[in-house]
């Protein structure tokens, strides 16, 4: 999944929200997303996070999350349980396995986009551990964003190449794992303070997600 | 490699990168079908194995903590019992891996360290399952659980050894971490 960091015309979050406030909003929304047991509400939340990621200037590609969802569901169907819905080539498709697969898939995709929206390279949490945690998530994002193909025929070489590539790119842009003048991120300028519009958007987002949890 | 950040030391920054690698492998593992619930290959332990001779003890413990927290966030299990099992398993396996690596030195390979870590993780999780979820019935799961855990530890250890032998990235990182 590509969560592009290149220039984009829309960067609403950058203009209206301090990264720290955005991160706190993400933390606040996280339980409302994770505790959501209704699959259709969870799916709606995923689409909401994708739309927000787009509004924040992230590149949205539909195929990777679709493939991810399909592969997770397929993997879960391999462990059948619950009511048998149908059989495909003699293999039972069970309701329990299907629901578990879809819940896992929406969790994965939703968290990815929520992270893209709420975790910004400029984020600095107080203290060293906060910075380290944000840094870890940021590097994870960088690795996940790498769109060059992983060579499955050579997993060792493929992983090594991926790490060298990501590590090298981060170093070149002054954010390397082995040294940087920028603290936790810092590639882009960011809002010095949260605007009233940004605050209203955060509150609305929180109310939507928590409201959905309470009502469902 | 270059100067350290004013905020994170160079070594801490590397720990964050290793932790991100844990998250990547954890995500990969999440996609692998499991024949039994709770069964894990433990791919995310690979960076911890690789970190054993790259970082001092406090940094490895920090890496384990970051791994557990990151996995909880990415897998969406931060507020569930899965997080508790993950924490118990990761801490126990991490401590055993550090201990065996430090105490046995060259007389134990990464494969041996990985198998011991996997056993420690499985035993800790069995104890937790017995205490919190299944009661004494948990011990019935013990033999197959431990056997599968040993096999998984062996596989991860083999992967770690091969990667450690061939990786250019790891060589650079080790130089930077020292």
Image: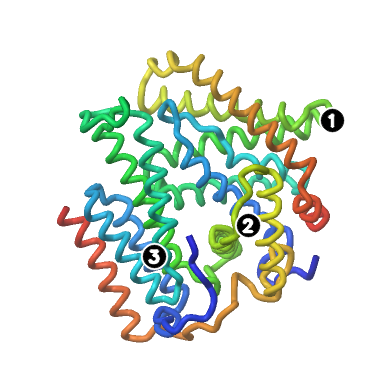
Q: Nearer the viewer, residue B151 or B52?
A: B151
Q: Residues within 10 Å of mark 2 (few under 14, many from 20)?
A: many
Q: Residues within 10 Å of mark 1 (few under 14, many from 20)?
A: few
Q: Give coordinates of residue B62: x percent, y percent.
A: 63, 50
Q: Residue furthest front?
A: A89
* Image point (32%, 28%), residue name: A89
User: Is A60 placed left or right of B117 in the picture?
Assistant: left
Q: How is the image coloured?
A: rainbow
Cα separation between marks 2 and 3: 20 Å
Q: Give coordinates of residue B176: x percent, y percent.
A: 80, 58
* Image point (50%, 20%), residue name: B145
Q: Which chain is disc 2 placed on?
A: B
Residue annotated with mark 3: A26
Q: Give coordinates of residue A159: x percent, y percent.
A: 66, 49
Q: Earlier in the sequence, mark 1 or mark 2?
A: 2
Residue annotated with mark 2: B16
Q: Which chain is disc 1 placed on?
A: B
User: Is A50 placed left or right of A168 in the picture?
Assistant: left
Q: Residues within 10 Å of mark 3 (few under 14, many from 20)?
A: many
Cα separation between marks 1 and 2: 27 Å
Q: Are marks 1 and 3 in contact (CB under 8 Å)?
A: no
Choose top left, top right, bottom left or bottom right for residue B135.
top left
Tag 2 secondary structure:
helix
Q: Nearer the viewer, residue B113 or A47?
A: A47
Residue annotated with mark 1: B106
Q: Give coordinates of residue A48: x percent, y percent.
A: 30, 66
């Amino acid at each position: 999944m590509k969560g592009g960091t290149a220039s984009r015309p829309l960067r609403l979050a950058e203009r209206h929200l301090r990264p720290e406030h955005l991160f706190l909003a993400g933390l606040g929304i996280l339980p409302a997303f994770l505790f959501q047991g209704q699959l259709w509400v969870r799916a709606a939340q995923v689409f909401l996070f994708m739309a927000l990621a787009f509004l924040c200037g992230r590149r949205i590609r539909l195929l990777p999350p679709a493939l991810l969802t399909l592969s997770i569901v397929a993997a879960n169907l391999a462990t059948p349980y619950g009511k048998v819905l149908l059989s495909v080539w003699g293999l039972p498709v069970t309701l329990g396995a299907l629901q578990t697969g879809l819940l896992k898939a929406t969790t994965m995709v939703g968290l990815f986009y929520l992270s893209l929206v709420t975790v910004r390279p400029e984020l600095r949490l107080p203290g060293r551990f906060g910075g380290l945690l944000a840094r870890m998530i940021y590097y994870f994002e960088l690795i996940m964003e790498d769109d060059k193909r992983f060579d499955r025929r050579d997993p060792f070489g493929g992983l090594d190449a991926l790490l060298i590539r990501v590590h090298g790119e981060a170093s070149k842009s002054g954010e390397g794992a082995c040294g940087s003048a920028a603290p936790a991120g810092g590639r882009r300028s960011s809002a010095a303070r949260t605007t009233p519009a940004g605050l209203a958007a955060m509150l609305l987002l929180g109310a939507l997600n928590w409201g959905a949890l309470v009502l469902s | 490699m270059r100067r350290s950040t004013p905020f994170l030391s160079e070594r801490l920054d590397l720990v964050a990168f290793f932790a991100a690698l844990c998250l990547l492998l954890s995500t990969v593992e999440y996609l692998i079908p499991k024949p039994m619930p709770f069964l894990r290959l433990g791919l995310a332990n690979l960076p911890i194995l690789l970190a054993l001779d790259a970082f001092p003890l406090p940094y490895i413990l920090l890496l384990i903590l970051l791994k557990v927290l990151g996995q909880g966030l990415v897998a969406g299990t931060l507020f569930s019992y899965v997080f508790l099992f993950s924490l118990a398993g990761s801490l126990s396996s991490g401590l055993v891996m550090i201990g065996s690596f430090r105490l046995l030195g060259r007389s134990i390979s990464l494969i041996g360290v990985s198998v011991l870590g996997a056993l420690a993780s499985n035993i800790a999780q069995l104890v937790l399952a017995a205490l919190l979820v299944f009661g004494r019935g948990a011990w019935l799961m013990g033999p197959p659980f431990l056997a599968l855990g040993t096999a998984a530890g062996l596989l991860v250890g083999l992967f770690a050894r091969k990667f450690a032998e061939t990786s250019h990235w790891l060589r650079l990182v080790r130089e930077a971490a020292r």
